Amino acid sequence: QVQLVESGGGLVQPGGSLRLSCAASGSIFSDYDMTWYRQAPGKQRELVATITRTGSTNYADSVKGRFTISRDNAKNTVYLQMNSLKPEDTAVYYCNARRSVLGVPRDYWGQGTQVTVSS
């Protein structure tokens, strides 16, 4: 089992930047695919960016070219660098860790961190 703690959220003006961090503990971090999700008020949770155990990345179309996901296995941490932020990026951002055990995916979630983009 893995525990996840997000940090780095806050209030930023449109066009600004933030870097989110998700620190993992309790298991072998490098065994997990890591994903950032977000959920805006009244909307469903959506995938933002994924980085696999091998370092492959995938992004939602809405953030391509603006957001960058990375991981540091030595620090058991995944990051989300967010540039050129827009008001529509306002949401609670959640960190997810996924590992398949005997073919069954197991998901673990952090508590979320609020990102607000507003002037």
Image (cartoon, rainbow, N blue to C red):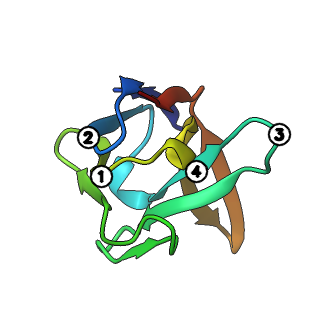
The Cα–Cα distance between marks 1 and 2, rounded to whole angstroms, is 6 Å
Q: Earlier in the sequence, mark 3 or mark 1?
A: 3
For label 2, the SS is loop
Q: Earlier in the sequence, mark 1 or mark 2?
A: 2
- At x 45%, y 32%, the residue is 26
Q: Earlier in the sequence, mark 4 or mark 2?
A: 2
Give the answer, above or below, for where 96 lies relative to 92: below
User: Mark 1 touching mark 2, by CB under 8 A?
Assistant: yes
User: Mark 4 touching mark 2, by CB under 8 A?
Assistant: no
The Cα–Cα distance between marks 4 and 3, rounded to whole angstroms, is 15 Å
Q: Earlier in the sequence, mark 3 or mark 2?
A: 2
Specify whether 14 is left or right of 35.
left
Q: Quadrant of the N terminus?
A: top right
The Cα–Cα distance between marks 1 and 4, rounded to whole angstroms, is 18 Å
Q: Which residue is mark 2?
A: 17
**Residue farthest toward the left in the current orientation of the protein:** 74
Q: Earlier in the sequence, mark 1 or mark 4?
A: 4
